[in-house]
Amino acid sequence: MTLWFVFALMTVAAIFAVLWPLGRATPATSGGSEANVYKDQLAEIERDLASGLIGASEAEAARVEIGRRLLAAVDGEAAAAPKANLPLRRSAAVAALVGLPVMAAAFYLALGSPQLGDFPLAARSRMADVNQPLANLVAQVEAHLEKNPTDGRGWNVLAPVLSRLGRYDDAVRAYRNSITYNGDSSERRADLGEALTGVAGGVVTAEAKAEFERAVAQNADDPKANYFLGLAAEQDGRKDDAASIWRAMLAKAPADAPWRSLVQASLTRVGGGVVAPALSNETMAAAKDMSADDRSAMIRGMVDRLATRLKQDGNDVEGWLRLVRAYMVMGERDKAVAALTDARQAVANDAERLRQLNEGLKNLGLDG
Amino acid sequence: MIAEAGHYALVLALGLALIQSIVPMLGARWGDVALMNVARSTALAQLLFVGASFIALVMLHVTSDFSVVNVFENSHSMKPLIYKITGVWGNHEGSMLLWVSILALFGGLVAAFGNNLPLTLRAHVLAVQAWIASAFYLFILLTSNPFLRIANPPIEGRDLNPVLQDIGLAVHPPMLYLGYVGFSISFSFAVAALIEGRIDAAWARWVRPWTLLAWIFLTLGIAMGSYWAYYELGWGGWWFWDPVENASLMPWLAGTALLHSAVVMEKRNALKVWTILLSILTFSLSLLGTFVVRSGVLTSVHAFATDPARGVFILLILCLFIGGSLSLYAARAASLKQGGLFAPISREGALVLNNLFLTTACATVFIGTLYPLALEVLTGDKISVGAPFFNLTFGPLFVPLMIAVPFGPLLAWKRGDLLGAAQRLTAAGIAALIAIAVLWAWTRGGASFAPLAIGLAVFVVAGALTDLAERLGLFRLPFGTSVQRARGLPRAAWGTAFAHAGVGIALIGIVCETTWNSEYIGTMKPGDSAKVAGYELKLDDIGQRQGPNFREMVARFTVGLDGKTLSVMTPSKRNFTTRGASTTEAALLTRGVSQLYISLGDIAADGGIAVRIYHKPMVLLIWFGPVLMAFGGFLSLSDRRLRVGAPKPAKAARALQAAE
């Protein structure tokens, strides 16, 4: 409301500026005239002569010249006396009273944002934190780090947020700072590599790969680093390498690892899928276009075919392990245990195969 | 509310300007005093509203209200207060608001102090001012609105271009704009005279002081901009013949010519039509400068933003005002009353010569600046016209002008005595010859033009002093009388002498700097030292420092001369994370009027740092000259006498001269 009141006051002031001279009857000031200038000049010549700035003869010459101009000016100044033109004054007044507010309103309402108040920074930084959008909090942390660039904890907090916001360039810088001030670790290296991959739009560049390799050097089982190394292999066209990296990950991973399904899906993509032993390209292409239900039906069909094959020929240790894993992935623990028992029976006669099987099962974590 | 009130004030200013551009014209046409006086009150109210709008924008920047797009894009909450304020005009929208604020200021001044102007003239002048103002208000509101808002304000701004975060921004643009826009007064007077169909003697009285004021600010603005470029850009150069620099040089050259022809008009009632044309040209060149810089036709540090809509809009304004005023001139100039006559050898004649050289020089700059643009538009070829072109065209034009400068003030009005003037300048000529000879012997060969150019500069300075000595009767009359005369001498005469001497001094600086500049460019490690022009500079260490919104790498140099330690210089490189940009902060050590200049480059892999060290002899004279010119201008401006150029009588003059 105050805003509109201020606007109204300003408009009134503007209108007043136009109406004021119109309202006055006949202003006393008639302004200067050409003759006045020449009269002033004549007076100035007298002063200059008196102070010795010009000689008498020059003063005389100047007087003659100016006098001539003065006469001409006076002749020409028989101008028309000022007269009031009431219709024009009235229309000017109407233009001010109506035109000015209408024009101002038209322009302002089209361009302005009267619904917005002021947002000076001082007032806003006192606002409750929960109400602030994430970007504002990020900006505050950034401002803090600008002043205290060695605050490792700050970089640690900031980096993943930046990464999630898609500000990968800044995230890369933040992770690098975090590594500098918090010390090196496989997780930070892997995160840095992920951010670098983000910068490159999802391509694992040589720079990013180097970070993942550093992470793996510190912790061979770092899941993120391993996953991305697999991805790098896939992007390089080495699908088999990718598959073996991911397969090894799945083999070592705990059953409830949150990234299992991601790796599983990736594995499926490169054709090294556990549950899809030999998916042809056509099947892969078909699988891509399927709905979720269709796809799980297809997978189930393949698992069943594998189970049938193993029942006929039980010597395939890899096949058994794959089947057990497939059941685990599908969440059918009972079937997995049953398949395990079947497998033990099938290879019971072969010590070497039994050892292989037990080795593989250990990794699956089924026996605990 | 501040933002919206500022926005609304700007809209109201547009409304008032529209009324001011029509009503007084009608009043003048029908002879109604009240309608003519509307111009006065609306001009003052306009100043009030634009001023309020500008102050609102300053407040928004100071409080870091990032709900305003302009503040968000050009400010940062951690910027020091001074840069929050200067940042207001460190961007396109804000600088245009400053432009119209100054325009309104000049309009307000005419309204407030124009009592001695004939009513119709004042009405016409203010109406023309309002046309310009309306065009630019529309431009601002429609294409460059500084008051646009963001509904969900971000917490932090994008910061100002780091190069602009300097005290230079506080001085350079306002000065330059005072200059550019100040010429709008003489333009408005010229157009008003053309509309009225007669040139009033009152105009002659007004045009010189107002042109002088604009010229002073433009001179200082250009000099300041040049010094700023010198220390901030890190290359040690002070003039690049960059199109943006040329855009400010052109109005300066035309304005200098206008200033001199306005003197003739004020004192002698002659050269009126030419002065009108120059007024139109000068302001047109100011507008052209605005167009070139603001439209994005050129990319430089000055082109804050490029937007085709803006370019087209400014081009329209340009065509309207330049085309309109020149057509008006073509239609009306023939019917204007010509002023007094004068002989070719006379003060008037000398000033005409000055005008010819200045306008020709202005034309060469114009061609050199716009030809590449025109060629690119027409054929798509990109060429660059640089220093060689300007040195070859601008230089030869300035040499005869310089030779002529000392003669002008020594010639009498109406009919002068060239031989007499030459005799009186003998001493100055001898001084120049001695300077040439000494320099030639001292430098032994080298650039043979340099001693000649310096001789010319000495001639200009000595000529200005000769003029003063002549007027004071120094050495001719007893000393006491001379002192008395010095007191009585009009300040305008002092001003002329100072301004002309300033030109010569600037020339000395330019020649010395370009000829005897010595430099060292190389990579240095802590502990290394370099020798430049006899100075020994040792790099002590390189450190890091945290500024308010930047980090900087600071190098410490110990400067020694003949084994004695003189001083410590700390050039630095600043890194601004918000914009991801860095600036070079050169370190300057002033020795007399010469300077040592160090700027840092990048750090090499082996820990060494690229360093550029320059020794620039007499470099400060380049800017001291313009300051002296501006000081002369102020002296002349403070002289409130009426100017009457008393003519030399046709005959019997010699006999009576002794009375002087």
Image (tube, coloured by chain):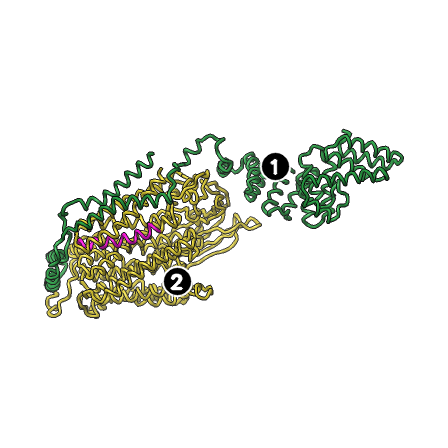
Chain colours: A green, B yellow
Mark 1 element type: loop
Magenta highlight range: B117-138
Badge 1 density bin: few <14, some 14–19, many ≥20, Cα 10 Å: few
Report the Cα–Cα distance between label 2 and label 1.
57 Å
Kindly identify which residue carries mark 2.
Answer: B369
Residue drawn 42% across and 65% down?
A: B388
Kindly identify which residue carries mark 1.
Answer: A183
Look at discs 2 and 1 and give the one toward the viewer. 2
The one of B19 and B241 positioned closer to us in this rendering: B19
- Residue B264 visible to an observer of this rendering: yes
x and y percent of residue B310 in the render?
Answer: 39, 53
User: What is the quadrant of residue A316 in the picture?
Assistant: top right
**What amino acid is labelled 1 in the image?**
Gly
**What amino acid is labelled 2 in the image?**
Thr
Residue drawn 68% across and 50% down?
A: A236
x and y percent of residue B277 in the render?
Answer: 26, 63
Badge 2 density bin: few <14, some 14–19, many ≥20, Cα 10 Å: many
Which chain is home to disc 1? Answer: A
